[in-house]
């Protein structure tokens, strides 16, 4: 893991915060997925992301903040488990992003791709823990491929 990545998820200063966003029908995304494997967070908090313009129609976005005391040794596996769990529960797309990365006006667009470090949709889960890769054209295209599934 790069130091920028570690800094990005450790911004609270005394713990690590992994922010999972799930987009889909409210019943599918309002609760965090049930994950029985991997390191367990010390706390999970969920928040409805209000879409004031209702750009997503009947779809909604929820943020599920996973709090850990330190960066888990099995971070890659944890991120993949939570994303796959979200998709299995019915999310159309799900992603992990740094604090401040969420904005309805810039939902999964190329410009914010460097602030997203993992995405999932029906085609699979992709991760980008490396700072250089998160700034690549390939990663931006992957993030945008998730957007294309929710925005015509």
Image: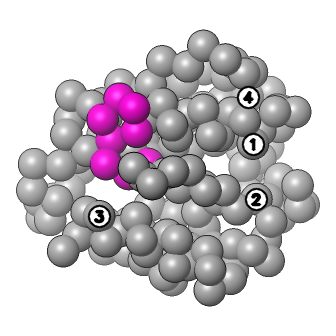
Closer-to-camera residue (79/145): 145
Residue at which label 4 appears: 68
Residue 136's tag is none
Closer to the eye: label 4 or 3? 3
Looking at the image, which residue is at 88% across and 55% down? 1
> Does label 3 or label 2 sit earlier along the sequence?
2
In the rendered image, residue 8 lying in the magenta stretch gets the answer no
Residue at which label 3 appears: 149
Work out how far the residue at label 4 is from the one at label 3, CA to CA, in angstroms.
Answer: 31 Å
Q: Residue 147: x percent and y percent?
A: 35, 68
Instruction: Find out whether the residues at labels 3 and 1 contact each other: C-beta distance under 8 Å.
Output: no
> Does label 3 or label 1 sit earlier along the sequence?
1
> Does label 4 or label 1 sit earlier along the sequence?
4
Work out how far the residue at label 3 is from the one at label 1, CA to CA, in angstroms.
Answer: 24 Å
Number of numbered discs on residues:
4
Magenta stretch, residue numbers: 87-95
Work out how far the residue at label 2 is from the one at label 1, CA to CA, in angstroms.
Answer: 9 Å
Q: Residue 117: x percent and y percent?
A: 64, 59
Residue at which label 1 appears: 76
Residue 129's tag is 2
In the rendered image, residue 92 lying in the magenta stretch gets the answer yes
Work out how far the residue at label 4 is from the one at label 1, CA to CA, in angstroms.
Answer: 14 Å
| Secondary structure of residue under mark 4 | strand
Closer to the eye: label 4 or 1? 1
Q: Residue 88: x percent and y percent?
A: 39, 32
């Amino acid at each position: 893991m790069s130091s920028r990545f570690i800094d990005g998820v450790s911004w609270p200063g005394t713990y690590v915060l992994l922010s999972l966003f799930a987009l889909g029908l409210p019943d599918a995304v309002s609760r965090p997925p049930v994950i029985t494997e991997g390191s367990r967070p010390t706390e999970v908090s969920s928040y409805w992301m209000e879409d004031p313009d209702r750009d997503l129609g009947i779809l909604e976005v929820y943020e599920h903040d996973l709090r850990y005391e330190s960066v888990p040794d099995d971070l890659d596996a944890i991120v993949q488990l939570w994303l796959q769990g979200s998709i299995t529960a019915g999310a159309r797309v799900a992603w992990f992003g740094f604090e401040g990365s969420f904005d309805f006006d810039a939902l999964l667009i190329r410009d914010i791709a460097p602030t997203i470090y993992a995405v999932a949709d029906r085609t699979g889960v992709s991760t980008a823990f490396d700072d250089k890769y998160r700034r690549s054209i390939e990663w931006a295209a992957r993030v945008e491929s998730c957007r294309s599934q929710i925005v015509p």
